[in-house]
Amino acid sequence: MGDANLNLSTSQRLQPFLILAKSVKGAAVSKLIMDALAAPGVYVFSELYQAPTSSRFAAKHGDVVRYNNLLRIFMYGTFSDYTEQASELPELNEVQLTKLKHLSVVTLAERSRTLRYALLQEYLKMSSVRQLEDLIIDAFYQGILRGKLDQRRQVLEVEFALGRDLRPEQLGQTIDTLAQWADVSERVLATIDNRIQAIHDTMNHVLWQRTDHDHKVEQLRQDVKQKKELSIGGSSGQTATAGVRTRRTPASDSMMTDDEHIFPHGSERGGRAKKSRGMKRYMVGHQ
C-alpha cells in the first residue's frame, strides 16, 4: 500500500471518532481519545486533536489535559518521550504500547534507512531480538513500514515508512522544503524546455538542409537533361547536311560523257582515239 493510500485509509478509520468528538462531553472525551489510540489501523491523530470539543474540554478539565498530552505523543512523539513523562500521562495497554513503538520506528526511519538492532532495542526498551523482529514484522503487516530484516548483519533496511503528523515547528520547515522543491522543479523544467527547443531547432535545420540538397540535385538533373537534349539536336543537323552533299555528287557525275566518265580529260587513251579518227578522215579524202 502506498503512502498516500495508507494515509487516506487511516484518516477514514479515524472518521467515526471525529463524529463522536462533536457530541461527547466530560469524561467521555478521555475515553474517546484512549479508544482512538487503540483502534486498529489508526496512525494519524491531528484531526482528533484539533476537534473543537477536545480542545474546549482540555482547557476546562485538567484530567482531559493529560489525555491530550498523550494524544500529542502519538501524533509526533516516541516511546522514549512517553517513558520520560509516564508519571504525568495515562497508562497505556499492550495494544497502545505496540502502536506507539511502531510509530517510534517510523520516526527513526525518517532519519536513517538502515537501523541497527542494537539501536532499536535500546530505543524501544526491548531486550530480546525475537521480540524486536516480531514487532517489526507486525509493523510490516500493518502497512506502516516496508523493508527487510537482515539477521546476519542485525539491521533493518527500511524501504518505506508512513508519514506521521507534523510537529508545529515542522510546518515551516515543510513549507520551506516544498518551496525549494518547487524552485528546483521550475529550473529542471526550464532546462528540459530549452533542450526540447534545441532539438526542434536542430531537426528543422536538418530538414532545411535535406530540402535544399534535394532541390539542388533536381536542378542539376534538369541542367544535365537540357544539355543532353541540345547536344543530340546539334548532331542531327550535321548528319542531315552530309546526306545532302552525298546525293548531289552522282547528279553532277551523270552529266559527264562516257569517255570522260571512264577516261578523264587528258588521259592517254582519249588522245589516241581522237588521232585515229583524224587519220581515217584524211585517208578517205586522199583517195
Image (spheres, rainbow, N blue to C red):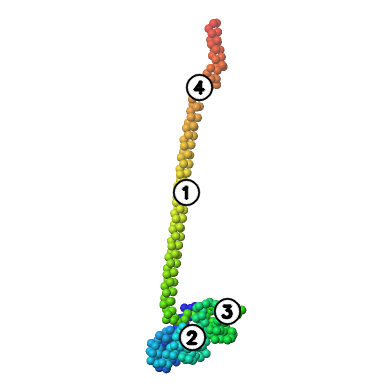
Query: SS for tag 3?
Result: strand
Residue type at tag 3? Val
User: What residue is rendered at 51% in x and 20% in y?
Assistant: 257
Q: Earlier in the sequence, mark 3 or mark 2?
A: 2
Residues under numbered marks 1 and 4 in contact, where contact means CB atoms less than 8 Å apart: no
What residue is disc 2 on?
A: 81
- Amino acid identity at mark 2: Asp
For marks 4 and 3, give the CA distance.
Answer: 130 Å
Q: Earlier in the sequence, mark 3 or mark 1?
A: 3
Mark 1 or 2: in front is: 2
273 left or right, relative to 37 = right
Disc 2, SS? helix
For the C terminus, the image quarter is: top right
Marker disc for residue 155: 3
| Place of residue 129 in the rendered image (x, y in percent of width and height, measured from the top left) | 59, 84
Relative height, residue 217 to residue 235 (above, below): below
Of residue 247 and residue 230, the one placed in the foreground of this image is 230
Work out whether mark 1 precedes mark 2 in sequence or the reverse, and give the earlier one.
2
Give the SS element for disc 4.
Answer: loop
Residue at the spot of label 1? 217
Badge 2 density bin: few <14, some 14–19, many ≥20, Cα 10 Å: some
User: How packed is label 1: few (under 14 Cα within 10 Å), some, or many (20 or more)?
Assistant: few
C-alpha distance separating marks 3 and 2: 23 Å
Tag shown at residue 256? 4
